[in-house]
Image (cartoon, rainbow, N blue to C red):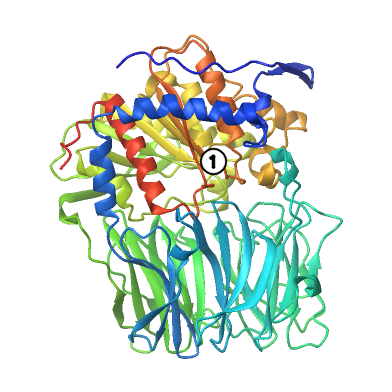
Amino acid sequence: MRKITYPPTERIDVTEEHFGRTVVDSYRWLENDAPDDRAVAAWIEAQNAVTRKHLDALPGREHFRKRIAQLLDYDRYTVPRKRGDRYFFNVIKGNENQPSLYVRDGVFGESRVLIDPKTWSEDGADALTDWSVSDDARYVAFGVQEGGTDWRTIKVLDVESGKELGDALDGARFTRLAWAPDGSGFFYSRMPRPAKGSSKGSVVANHAVYFHKLGTGQAEDRLIYSTPDRPELLHGADRVSGGRYLTISSTPGTSESALTVVDLEASDWTPRTVVADMDSAWSVIGNSGSTLILTTTHGAERVRIVSLDLSEENPEPKEIVAEAADGAVLDAVVLAGDTLLASYQIDVNTEIRRFTLDGKPDGTVDLPGVGSARFLEGDAKEAFFVFTSHDAPIAIYHYDLASKAVTPWAEPKLPIDLDSIHVEQRFYRSKDGTEVPLFLIRRKDVTSAAPTLLYGYGGFGISQIPIYNPIQLAWVEQGGVLAVANIRGGGEYGRAWQRAGQLENKQNSFDDFIAATEFLKRTGITSQDGLAIQGESNGGLLVSAVTNQRPELFDVALPGVAVTDMLRYDQFTGGGLWKGEFGSPSEERHFRNLMTYSPYHTIRQGSDYPAILATTADADDRVVPAHTFKYIAALQAADLGEKPRLVRTDTRAGHGAGMPIDKVIAQHADMWAFAAYWTGLKTLPTK
């Protein structure tokens, strides 16, 4: 393939001093918003044209596009939420662009569509997001996401008639929806809309919880809780179905939070903060009278179950279920009548344990196999859980509390023979000797070294649990290997595992990922010139950072919606919420650490770099596309060898959530074809 000629990118150096160090930012002008800035819009158009020309010429692209579409052609359900005798759930049927909301009368009755977002936009880029059903199953409050943005418009539907009410609320962002017990209205979170212009105008600030009474204008909504003295905090309001209390979690963007409660049986709805510090995570499961039942990391690195008696003036947590002695991490708990259904992660695989309300062990739940499972809601009679694994599609199961019987509720029929797929878990040692889990997924007949796609994330305490991903299986079907590394920074082994990969310890995440690469090659799993690495968001940072640190290890890098400018990440949209993960660039110790790995600032001039295809989207207001634009401009300007450094920018798409399926298919067909070409994976002829 011919050497690529990149569009010219103007250098306009901005020179700054940081703690005695001179830093030059040559592409800051790419931070301006397109289409408001014509120069940025023209740059995006020119870059997309060059990228499109390269991708359209790749031999495997059409095969991947068709096969991914085929692999996604099955019905995908979410766990139902029960209100009264009705069950509400999402379904994506086949290659529909967006999930619709369905309702079913009775647990195994007929279903009907309540909300179908296909009619909302011609390109399928407007999505149904958050939704909540009133206790009497009369109303659904739901969020509308337009073109991938994090902003939401909240609307209300009458379940019986299927008609929308006149209520429409603007400015919702990072919100949950929680109904008042009497169904008169609901609680939600919003913040002021930014002025048009630079992305810096949309910094997350002044988040607040409001109550909206049905039939009234938004201007009349009642302010329930805000922290004007701490404008950087996020406030999420929730209420367990049938619960007495509204619970408000306040966080600076980490998993730790303060906890405020509102007694909805009281007439004044006065917020009461019961946990003021933000040193631990608190999640309310439910209540028994005036006693809250919660999970917390307070006094437990791997989470425990406690109670807080709100009748006390200064309630202190009382232990119900201690932190697991066997090293398991408590992942989620559902209160079902007088039973606690607790999901534990053991070496990144799930076991569900039952406990009585006083904390006594009461057996386990039989799962369909080894993988990931979680209960989401339940009552005294029944509960539902989701189960999946790398070789098992997401399926929903009904659980009878009394008999403990597990019955399939929604099992998809797949367009693939999963018996041909082999999944195994391996462990390898990182640079400092830490043992790290790694999942390998490949065809059973692939027994020698093969081109490999290595995926990682490693941040914010988010675990990379086994989950069915038909898009990735399109790579595996061709004879490639898929590897998923459970590196530090995630939550696979609790808070200690997370902290070992954040702030000044962030390099551990990169070292773990690099060690996974070395393990794959040393053990003959990966061909010596056939390794592609992929990650999105914080995972995009991971891919970009390790590419700079060890470019000779990788043949292809696929950073998606990546955080790449670690000196300015906190100045855009929600970036300020990530200081607990990365550290503040305005503090010297954090600045010096960030400069050791910031992808935009650590490109190794004169090194032989892998082929790079960076993906982003014009409406991403979580990680603004300027991160990717500046990084790619710097790569293209450097002497890094003959392989391409390209950027693919989607339109009317955001950080991933709500992206229509046709855009998802097109993007991944491009990515897999690019990776296949530069790793030597031979794709089948297009049929």
Q: Position of residue 375 (x, y in %)?
A: 44, 72
Q: Position of residue 166 (x, y in %)?
A: 65, 77
Q: Which residue appears farthest toward the front when viewing the image?
A: 122
Q: Is residue 166 left or right of residue 436?
A: right
**Closer-to-camera residue (5/109):** 5
Above-or-below relation of 274 to 630: below
Binning the other alpha carbons within 10 Å of mark 1 as few (below 14), some (14 to 19) or many (20 upward) gives: many
Q: Residue at x 42, y 72 (%)?
A: 79
Q: Is residue 609 something one can see in this rendering?
A: yes
Q: Quadrant of residue 270?
A: bottom right
Tell me the quarter of the image containing the C terminus. top left
Above-or-below relation of 553 to 661: above
Q: Which residue appears farthest toward the right when viewing the image?
A: 229
Type of amino acid under label 1: Asn
Q: Position of residue 686 (x, y in %)?
A: 17, 39
Q: Is residue 425 something one can see in this rendering?
A: no
Q: Quadrant of residue 566?
A: top right
**Residue named by callout 1:** 538
How many numbered tags mark residues here?
A: 1
Q: Which residue appears farthest toward the left when viewing the image?
A: 445
Q: Position of residue 259 (x, y in %)?
A: 72, 67
Q: Quadrant of residue 467?
A: bottom left
Tell me the quarter of the image containing the N terminus. top left
**Closer-to-camera residue (614/443):** 614
**Closer-to-camera residue (208/270):** 208
Above-or-below relation of 85 to 269: below
Helix, strand or loop under label 1? helix
Q: Is residue 527 left or right of residue 252?
A: left
Q: Is residue 164 left or right of residue 445?
A: right
Q: Residue at x 48, y 85 (%)?
A: 379
**Closer-to-camera residue (25/594):** 25
